[in-house]
Image (cartoon, rainbow, N blue to C red):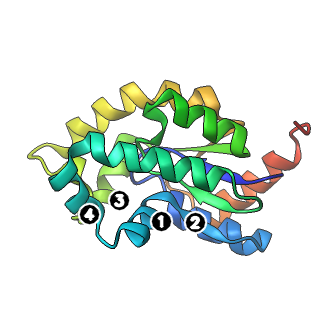
Amino acid sequence: MRNLILVGPMGAGKSTIGRLLAKELRLPFKDSDKEIELRTGTNIPWIFDKEGEAGFRDRETAMIKSLCNEDGIVLATGGGAVMRPVNREYLHAGGRVVYLHASIEQQVARTSRDRNRPLLRNANPEKILRDLLAIRDPLYREIADVIVETDERPPRMVVLDILERLAQLPPR
């Protein structure tokens, strides 16, 4: 396995589960959004404010390309990383892709107090999350080697489920 890549919507648990997977597999953990912040010296909301979503997505594409060229990492991506076809190509080629699926209710509960999510700065975050999932769910599924439900499951159980299911996949 080259890399283990987690995709899914905001609030699905990509960072939490990614850290646990990395620890279990004794691999470095990288979060594409955090890597963008580290390399730019600023946060995602600031990039959205100054460069717009298109500017952020350009930075995200460059970061995903870079991270997918690494070997032996667990990578958590931003929820919108799958929107660009080129990103889906990088992700699919970069390793095994796990889609962490979460219900809208779970996403709302997990993101409700997080002020670092520019797309949810709205009076109706539930509608935004619903609209985003309608568009992105088929894209997550398109590149996923494994799809795992995260609702109402302890992160440790999700990790064990992922490892078990990955072990059953044929090599590629």
Residue on which disc 1 sits: 35
Which corner quadrant of the image does residue 143 belong to?
top right
Under circle 2, the secondary element is strand
Is 89 placed above or below 61 here?
above
Disc assigned to residue 116: 4
Task: Answer with mark 1 or mark 2, whichever residue precedes in sequence.
Answer: 2
| Neighbour tally class for label 3: few under 14, some 14-19, many 20 plus, Cα within 10 Å | some
Under circle 3, the secondary element is helix
Amino acid type, label 4: Asn
Task: Answer with mark 1 or mark 3, whichever residue precedes in sequence.
Answer: 1
| Neighbour tally class for label 4: few under 14, some 14-19, many 20 plus, Cα within 10 Å | few
Task: Answer with mark 3 or mark 2, whichever residue precedes in sequence.
Answer: 2
Q: Nearer the viewer, mark 4 or mark 3?
A: 4
Is 108 placed above or below 18 here?
above
Residue 129 in the image, given as x and y percentages of width and height: 29, 40
Residue 75 in the image, given as x and y percentages of width and height: 61, 58
Q: Are marks 1 and 2 in contact (CB under 8 Å)?
A: yes
Which corner quadrant of the image does residue 93 belong to?
top right
Residue on which disc 2 sits: 30
| Neighbour tally class for label 2: few under 14, some 14-19, many 20 plus, Cα within 10 Å | some
Under circle 1, the secondary element is helix
Residue on which disc 3 sits: 110
In which quadrant is the C terminus drawn? top right
Q: Residue at x 56, y 58 (%)?
A: 153
